[in-house]
């Protein structure tokens, strides 16, 4: 049971070396589910230090239970990237986001909502990182953010349609990026702003 006070930080699967019976495995999976819920609760309360610690535990636990070449591990990596972004650790957020994107692309391909979500998180981290830079470095990082966010938007339009909340969220994220660039809209963003039926190819966003 999750209490309303400070969130518990649980060290999962310490000493786990694989194997075990089905009942033990199921208990461990339940622990991971509780841990993921605690991360969401920490984020909702703006307890970003807790969210980061819990997300690191989740990555460790998922890696031990399911392995690191699985979608559940890719999703946990993306959660950790988001926690780093919320805490302001943009370099680590970008590094983990890149890892999550490549894992998802290798495991399930590039036309899934999970992949679009990871692209969006990566783009948001790059967008915030750009604010800490100046001159050409800032412009280059904004280009990275634009590529990822517009790819996520195009992919969500294709998979989910114009009215889906995640598509609308992506539209808003691109709009904020445009404002950060002083209202300058690239040709790529112009295309993303208009509904299109073309296939998205977001592979280069994680370079």
Image (cartoon, grey):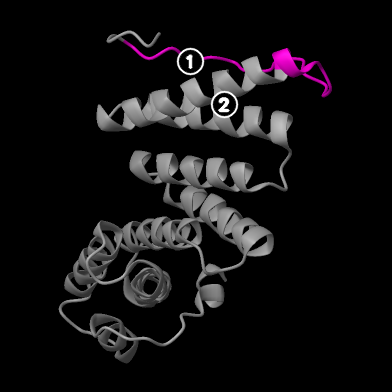
Which residue has dot 2 on it? Answer: 57
| Quarter assignment of residue 140 | bottom left
Q: Position of residue 47 (x, y in %)?
A: 31, 26
| Quarter assignment of residue 175 | bottom left
Q: Quadrant of the C terminus?
A: bottom right
Which residue has dot 1 on it? Answer: 9
Q: Residue at x 44, y 63 (%)?
A: 116
In the foreground, 13 or 146: 13
Q: Position of residue 29 (x, y in %)?
A: 61, 23
The residue stretch that appears in magenta: 6-24
Q: Residue at x 34, y 87 (%)?
A: 188
Spatial CA distance of label 1 from label 2 is 8 Å
In this image, 15 relative to 122: left or right? Answer: right
Q: Position of residue 79 (x, y in %)?
A: 47, 42
Question: How crowded is the residue under tag 1: few (<14 C-alpha within 10 Å), some, or many (20+)?
Answer: some
Pointer 1 with pointer 2, Cβ within 8 A: yes
């Amino acid at each position: 049971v999750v209490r309303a006070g400070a969130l518990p930080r649980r060290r999962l699967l310490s000493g786990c070396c694989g194997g075990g019976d089905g009942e033990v495995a199921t208990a461990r999976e339940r622990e991971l589910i509780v841990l993921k819920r605690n991360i969401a609760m920490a984020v909702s309360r703006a307890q970003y230090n807790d969210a980061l610690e819990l997300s690191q535990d989740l990555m460790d636990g998922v890696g031990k239970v399911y392995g690191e070449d699985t979608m559940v591990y890719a999703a946990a990596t993306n959660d950790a990237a988001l926690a780093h972004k919320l805490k302001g650790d943009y370099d680590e957020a970008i590094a983990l986001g890149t890892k999550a994107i490549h894992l998802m692309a290798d495991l399930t391909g590039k036309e899934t909502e999970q992949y679009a979500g990871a692209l969006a998180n990566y783009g948001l981290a790059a967008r915030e990182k750009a604010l800490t830079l100046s001159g050409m470095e800032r412009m280059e990082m904004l280009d990275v953010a634009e590529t990822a966010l517009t790819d996520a938007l195009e992919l969500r339009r294709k998979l989910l349609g114009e009215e889906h909340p995640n598509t609308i969220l992506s539209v808003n994220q691109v709009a904020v990026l445009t404002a950060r660039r002083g209202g300058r809209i690239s040709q790529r963003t112009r295309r993303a702003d208009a509904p299109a039926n073309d296939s998205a190819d977001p592979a280069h966003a994680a370079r």
